[in-house]
Image (tube, rainbow, N blue to C red):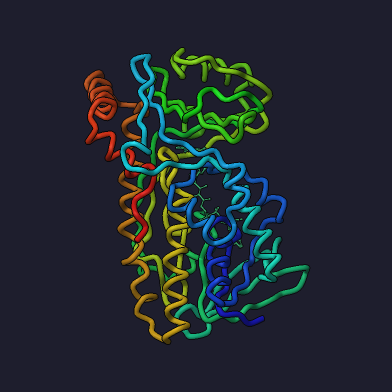
């Protein structure tokens, strides 16, 4: 097979890259090691920044998002038993939208297949070669047959555990890494919404977050040990923990738990995000702890810039924008890292903290809740920094 851009991974990064390239008249093929059903059912992110919402709508894959997405004007912070509202729309004129990542994935897969962009699901043994030549290749097995795609460029959109980043020769990339001494236990439940906004709750028992997926489906998370086994938690114990940590500030409607799982927390950045004709985008190049909901948004921002650099190359034959891809996207990546680290540090219990640290966290929460300048900084980062 031959294509212009070979893409590895059918997550938000790979699918959006193929979508933006198609709109620019550039051919691509996606290879994905999971099934279509698996990709469309994987419960993960849910919060979309204002510019990303606008991009999904403007590029023709936002119809369902417009109808079903839940627009949020801000968030609520709970500390000292009181809810404090931070109104992004008043502070920075932007909001956020709750729309499950798997819904974005479904909309993109549907649109790509309707436009004839090949997505090869359930491939195995994916491997890349000739990255530093003009004809890099993707090798894999599909339908029991060994296959190869020759491309002009490869989009490495295969997530944190993918093969693209490890395929770059040793010493060509630098990694920046931080692990956190906790994880999140997350549930999806068939239960009425707790509040019209998301609630980030600071509590002596540890952090908890209330978010939602629809008026009848809620998503809740609470801080747990990094190696916690979700199977050790009965549904009753989960609801009791959430009730305690949401601080009694609001009633907590309960219901059947549809899905539960533990997410470890990590900050990670690769520099640069390219080698030869391989370009990394999304979680394959960087991950953030989920507090602040930046992961999927960063993946979308990377591929917007990458698609523009590729379009520039095909239009002019010039490499300059592709050469400058990492330098163009990394400042946003690092600002999202800083913000995610800050939100995480502000709201979680750390193992060796003392009474001073707790007082300092509460002082900072109080500052955010009472200072327009501090609230504005939170709002500007949370609703999404300008993309251009
Ligand atoms: P992925 O979604 O990981 O996609 C990579 C794809 O590549 C996968 O489909 C994988 O199967 C495929 N793949 C891997 N290896 C291979 C291979 N060898 N060959 C072929 N295919 C391969 N982000 C937000 O912005 N907002 C949020 O609210 C938010 N909440 C989150 C909550 C949780 C619990 C978690 C876990 C994450 C959350 N995130 C959030 C982060 C977000 O989900 C990720 O940042 C996002 O999925 C990154 O997209 P991606 O396309 O880069 O990677
Ligand atoms: C969601 C996840 C987050 O990590 C967050 O900060 C906000 C919302 C969500 O899954 O909806």
Query: Which residue is at a point 54% across and 71% down the rendered structure image?
Result: 21
* Residue 57, position as x, y percentages in the image: 54, 55
Query: Which residue is at a point 26% across and 23% down the rendered structure image?
Result: 366
| Quadrant holding the N terminus | bottom right
* Residue 136, position as x, y percentages in the image: 53, 80
Q: Is residue 376 above or below residue 248?
A: below
Q: Indicate left or right for 34 with 134 as reference.
A: right
Residue 87 visible at all = yes
* Residue 336, position as x, y percentages in the image: 35, 49
Query: Which residue is at a point 31% across and 50% down the rendered structure image?
Result: 335
Query: Which residue is at a point 47% across and 70% down the rendered structure image?
Result: 307
* Between 141 and 256, the one nearer to me in the picture: 256
Q: Is residue 184 above or below residue 80?
A: below
Residue 223 visible at all = no
* Between 329 and 234, the one nearer to me in the picture: 329
* Between 163 and 94, the one nearer to me in the picture: 94
């Amino acid at each position: 097979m031959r294509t212009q851009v070979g893409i590895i991974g059918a997550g938000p990064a790979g699918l959006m890259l193929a979508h933006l390239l198609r709109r620019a008249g550039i051919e691509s093929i996606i290879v994905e090691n999971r099934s279509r059903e698996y990709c469309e059912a994987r419960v993960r992110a849910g919060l979309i920044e204002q510019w990303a919402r606008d991009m999904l709508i403007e590029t023709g894959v936002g119809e369902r998002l417009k109808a079903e997405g839940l627009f949020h004007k801000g968030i609520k912070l709970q500390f000292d038993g009181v809810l404090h509202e931070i109104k992004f729309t008043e502070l920075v004129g932007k909001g956020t939208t709750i729309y499950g990542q798997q819904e974005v994935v479904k909309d993109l897969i549907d649109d790509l297949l309707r436009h004839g962009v090949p997505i090869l699901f359930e491939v195995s043994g994916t491997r890349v070669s000739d990255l530093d030549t003009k004809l890099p290749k993707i090798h894999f097995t599909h339908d029991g047959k060994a296959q190869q795609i020759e491309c002009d460029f490869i989009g490495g959109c295969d997530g944190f555990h993918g093969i693209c980043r490890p395929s770059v020769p040793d010493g060509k990339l630098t990694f920046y890494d931080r692990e956190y001494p906790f994880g999140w236990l997350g549930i999806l439940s068939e239960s009425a919404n707790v509040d019209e906004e998301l609630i980030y709750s600071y509590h002596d028992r540890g952090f908890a977050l209330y978010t939602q997926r629809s008026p009848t489906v809620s998503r809740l998370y609470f801080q747990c040990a990094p190696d916690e086994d979700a199977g050790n938690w009965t549904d009753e114990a989960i609801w009791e923990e959430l009730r305690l940590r949401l601080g009694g500030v609001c009633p907590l409607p309960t219901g059947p738990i549809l899905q539960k799982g533990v997410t470890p927390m990590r900050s990670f950045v690769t520099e640069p995000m390219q080698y030869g004709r391989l370009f990394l985008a999304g979680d394959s190049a960087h991950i953030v702890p989920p507090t602040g909901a930046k992961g999927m948004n960063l993946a979308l921002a990377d591929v917007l810039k990458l698609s523009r650099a590729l379009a520039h190359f095909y239009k002019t034959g010039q490499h300059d924008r592709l050469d400058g891809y990492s330098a163009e996207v990394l400042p946003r990546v690092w600002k999202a890292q800083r913000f995610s680290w800050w939100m995480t540090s502000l709201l979680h219990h750390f193992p060796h903290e003392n009474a001073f640290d707790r007082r300092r966290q509460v002082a900072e929460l109080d500052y955010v809740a009472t200072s327009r300048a501090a609230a504005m900084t939170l709002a500007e980062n949370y609703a999404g920094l300008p993309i251009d």
